Image (spheres, rainbow, N blue to C red):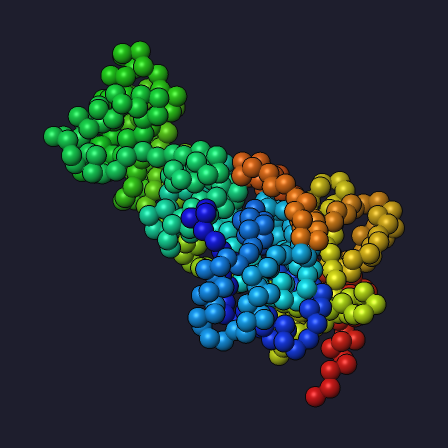
Amino acid sequence: MSAQNLTLLTDLYELTMMQGYFETQENETVIFDMFFRENPNKGGYSIMAGLDQVIDYIKNLNFSYEDVDYLRGLGIFSEDFLHYLSGFHFSGDIYAIPEGSVIFPREPLIKVVAPIMEAQLVETAILTIINHQCLIATKASRVVHAAQGNGVMEFGLRRAQGPDAGLYGARAAIIGGCVGTSNVLAGEMFDVPVLGTHAHSWIMSFKDEYTAFKEYARLYPDACTLLVDTYDTLKSGVPNAIRVFTEMREAGIHPKSYGIRLDSGDLAYLSKKARKMLDDAGFTDAVIAASNDLDEFLINDLKIQGAEITSWGVGTNLITSKDCPSFGGVYKLAAIQNEKGEFVPKIKISENVEKITNPGNKTIYRIYDKETGKIRADLICFVGEEYDTSQDLLLFDPNATWKKTRLEGGTYTMKEILKPVFIRGECKYQSPSVTEIAEFCRQEKETLWEETKRLFNPHKVYVDLSQKLYDTKTALLNSVSI
């Protein structure tokens, strides 16, 4: 999969539009913004992920002889255009919010500044990569938040929508906060922890449950988590696990990690009963892990019910983001460069207010409360706009302008969060490792108010427009004649 040529990973209309530009106009430089309109699951934030795969895609973007021959065989492309494609390489600029960052609707996650044919071609691949990984990273972050400090393991490979979704979904899940994955290929490719126990088939293949547990403990004494619900959790599984743990202790074997896993039944009830049985036998440090169609809502409910679960294996609902299967990112033209080298703002208008785009060459400043370090708002403005944090800053809701907040000078800080990734076709950005991104993500979530992290009716972080950008947008809206 890693060696696959992704150049033709695009929609046909990107190529037909490219040929249209090639035949009808100059290859003028434009700006496209990739952004999303709503957080998944009506949450308060999302997580940026997938940039490293976008970088690899852009670096390796070229049309092979086989690609050109295939396109020639479609019978819709001219020889002049195919000749252009045979020498294609990306020559533009790309700016992006770093992976692991908390992100919010309507702000550009990726900004592409390039000749229009190049900017058009990369649309589909950027969207499919970023939409998928942001979705899974965000879902993982919500699950991890619900677990309240317990470890969450990503166990979804067999339920993912194909190998790539399982592989890069595991990557995104680690970024979102999972402590490990069952996916061994993801472990090798991204140097992240791989975790797992055993299946019911292991138990069923032995003459009895006790023998199966004993043999597993003999093979893996340092990581011995036993699946206890094959036959009867409380009458058979837990007692047999305790018997094996007792024999290990008597033999002087002290595992680095040991415990039981519950995979069915009433997890709250069974975990509380199992905890008492383990504690009474002297195994107070034994882990109780749980799986079985978990998501953030069920984990939250189990926590409320006092479940004695200390480790969570989350599969289907995480790797597929089952209840919200699409991130909804879009890619829209924001500006076209004129003959003077100036970017002329462009706007898309819609009857749906949320689909009206923000025009121009933009950047984003994140505004923090100086005392707490928490995010107050994000401010989208034109490139080149400057702010003095010693002065008062007036923020306003761009859709309900009467809603205003004045930040007193000296009480806030600002940080530009769009970073250069490619400049004139050359990569200028070194991606951190996945574990480094995950740690950065953990720190980023510390900048969120607790009210923004909650699963139900979270407080929304404001994404505002600068006065200059708002005025430009309003003027463009008012200039449209019907």
Horizontal side, residue 458 vs residue 379: left or right: left
Q: Is residue 377 left or right of residue 141?
A: right
Nearest to the observer: residue 24 or residue 14: 24
Give me the residue at 68% from left, 57% from top. Answer: 92
Q: Nearer the viewer, residue 414 or 348?
A: 348
Occupied quadrant, residue 334: bottom right
Residue 276 locus on image (x, y percent): 32, 29
Residue at the image point whose x is 71% and y is 53% from the top = 424
Number of marks: 0
- Relative to the observer, which residue lies in front, 167 or 29? 29
Residue shown at the point (71%, 65%) measured from the top left: 29
x and y percent of residue 363 in the render? Answer: 73, 56
Residue 155 position in % (x across, y down): 37, 43
Indicate whether 389 appears above or below 380: above
Residue 464 location, x and y as percent? 72, 60
Image quarter in which the C terminus is found: bottom right
Residue 193 shows up from this direction: yes
Q: Is residue 85 left or right of residue 447?
A: left
* Relative to 306, residue 353 above or below: below
Single out the residue that lies furthest toward the left.
207
Is residue 46 visible to us here? no
